[in-house]
Image (spheres, rainbow, N blue to C red):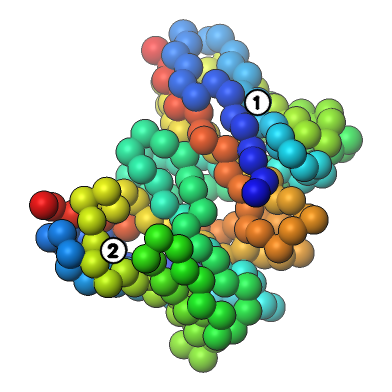
Amino acid sequence: GAVVSQHPSRVICKSGTSVKIECRSLDFQATTMFWYRQFPKKSLMLMATSNEGSKATYEQGVEKDKFLINHASLTLSTLTVTSAHPEDSSFYICSARDLGTLDGYTFGSGTRLTVV
Amino acid sequence: GDSVTQMEGPVTLSEEAFLTINCTYTATGYPSLFWYVQYPGEGLQLLLKATKADDKGSNKGFEATYRKETTSFHLEKGSVQVSDSAVYFCALGDTNAGKSTFGDGTTLTVKP
């Protein structure tokens, strides 16, 4: 089935620095990918929809300048957390769907971000 | 807008007990319905899915039936194992927009 690879799986960074998270569709092309954030003991909240070759669509309340999304190719979307602060610490997960199948959305394994 | 209401947890069961986790949804159109599982420290894995009314999704002994009349997609397993301990998320997928709406998750702990 479709595989989505997310990297890194864990990252610790200092306050004020930026962190880039990659999401790759390994065996299919994804014109659209989705970025979610999961707070401790909470569900997943959609942050933004990443569109290949165009600007991302952000959900209400998500800061565009803090969470930069780039979808430069049909197999790669990146999320950059800029000027990270401890409150940005969270579990970030991406997903994509292989439109060539009737399968559901495939999720990456997630990235645990800790800002110290 | 679309929403998913999931049975609150945590749920604690003994091994070989019967499991039901309730899930109801509100949606426009005809969404697909999913159950995902998240093991400690890991990402989400698709457990099962159903794409239309009356479809039954099944995997690893888990089952759920897409009930349009009750807008439900309850997860069941006849005999749980310790290895089933995880967080379970019910979700609906907007086939056109491509994004998913999740329930709040139910933590299942199975004790030997």
Instruction: Name the mark on residue B103.
Output: none
Task: Using the rendered view, name the quadrant where residue B50 is placed.
Answer: bottom right
Front one among A110 and A91: A110
Please state the chain letter of the residue tagged with numbered disc 1 in the rendered image: A
Query: In the picture shown, does residue B4 fall above or below A99?
Result: below
Residue B90, can we see it? no
Query: Farthest bottom residue?
Result: B69
Discs 2 and 1 carry the same chain letter: no
Residue at screen point 51% across, 91% down: B69
Residue with the mark numbered 1: A22
Task: Using the rendered view, name the quadrant where residue A108 is placed.
Answer: top right
Which quarter of the rendered picture does the C terminus of chain A lie within? top left
Mark 2 vs mark 1, foreground winner is 1
Instruction: Name the mark on residue B8.
Output: 2
- Disc 1: CA contacts within 10 A as few (<14), some (14-19) or many (>=20): many
Say what amino acid the circle numbered 2 marks: Glu
Say what amino acid the circle numbered 1 marks: Glu
Q: Position of residue B9 (x, y in %)?
A: 25, 59
Front one among A93 and A116: A93
Task: Using the rendered view, name the quadrant where residue B54 is placed.
Answer: bottom right
Label 1: element kind: strand
